[in-house]
Each structure stands twice: as structure tokens, then as C-alpha cells.
Image: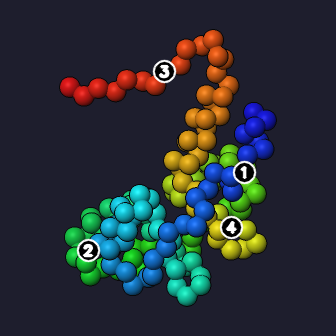
Amino acid sequence: MKEEAMSTVAQIMTKRPKSIGPKVSIASAAKTMRQARVGSLLIKKGKQFIGIITDTDIVRRAVASGKPLGKLTVEKIMTAPVCTIEGSDAIDDAQSMMADLGVRHLGVSKNGEIIGVISVRDVLSFYKRYAQSKISAEVRYEEPKITQD
């Protein structure tokens, strides 16, 4: 898998990740995620990223608690510090780190500063493109048909 070994996290990460302040309500954070079509937001205090909140955090740590989502702030449920991987690391390393840590989002760092975010979806999309590039032109490949009863 030569191409895979040469591909780095920085090549598939989301650049300029969305961020919010620590005092933002869970309800507001969820709206920001929906509008930006992202599954995570970095929490920024001053110029520093101090944590991350994901759609899963919102469900498990906020909604499930029954507390009012308009009053509960992201700093109460965020994961801190942000788990990071160097942008120069291989995509396989990101996949392994996510599996080992049980997370679906990693901050991407360069010289100790977070410059992006990589998600499990980014990794899966990369592997899909890689696999499709290896399928012979003679082999007919189709997406599975998903139907509902």
C-alpha cells in the first residue's frame, strides 16, 4: 500500500476547524454544528484550543443528563485536552490512535499548534478512494443498493 503509506493526516484533515467559546450553551453549539455540517467543534479560550465537543458528547453527556441545554455550557461536557496527532503522521496512525482512544475526532497539530481536525469519516473516505483506485477497470463496481421496506 504505497500510496497509503505516503498519505498524511494533513492531506485529508479539515483545515480551519470550527470553534466556539467555553461559555457557549449546548443548544447553541448544536445549532453551530448543524449549520456548519460538522460533528465536532474545538473550544477556544483566547488564542488557545482548550477542548473539543462532539455530537456524541452532546447526546451522552448533555441530552442524557436531562439538564437544560440552553443553560448547560460546552466547558462542562467538553473533552480536554484535545487528543492530537501530527499532520505529518500517516493516515494509518490516525486510524490506530482513534481506535485505541475510542474517539472519532483528533486535532491535527504542527509545531505544537492545532491546525485542523481529522474525523473517522475523513479516514473512511480516504480508504474508500484508495480501495476504488485499486479496483481493475474491467471489474464492475457498484455501490450497494439500500432500500427501506
Q: CA distance from mark 2 to mark 4?
A: 31 Å
**What's the mark number on residue 8?**
1
Residue hosting label 4: 109
Rendered residue at 71%/62% (across/down): 86
- Badge 3 local density, few (<14 within 10 Å), some, or many (20+)? few
Per the image, label 2 sits on a secondary structure element best described as loop
Closer to the eye: label 1 or 3: 3
Quick check: can you spot residue 61? Answer: no
Q: Amino acid at mark 1?
A: Thr
Are the residues tagged 4 and 3 within 8 Å (C-beta)? no
View extreme (bottom): residue: 46
Disc 3: which residue: 142
- Tags 2 and 4 touching, CB below 8 Å: no
The image quadrant that residue 59 belongs to is bottom left
Dot 1 and dot 4 residues touching (CB under 8 Å): no
What is the spatial separation of the Cα atoms under label 2 and label 1, in whole angstroms?
A: 37 Å
Q: Is residue 9 left or right of residue 36?
A: right
Foreground label between 2 and 1: 1
Residue 69 is marked as: 2
Mark 2 or mark 3: name the one nearer the start of the chain.
2
Cα gap from disc 1 to disc 4, whole angstroms: 12 Å
Residue found 58% across the figure and 58% down from its top: 14
Q: Name the secondary structure under disc 1.
A: loop
Q: Secondary structure at mark 4?
A: strand
Kind of residue at disc 4: Ser
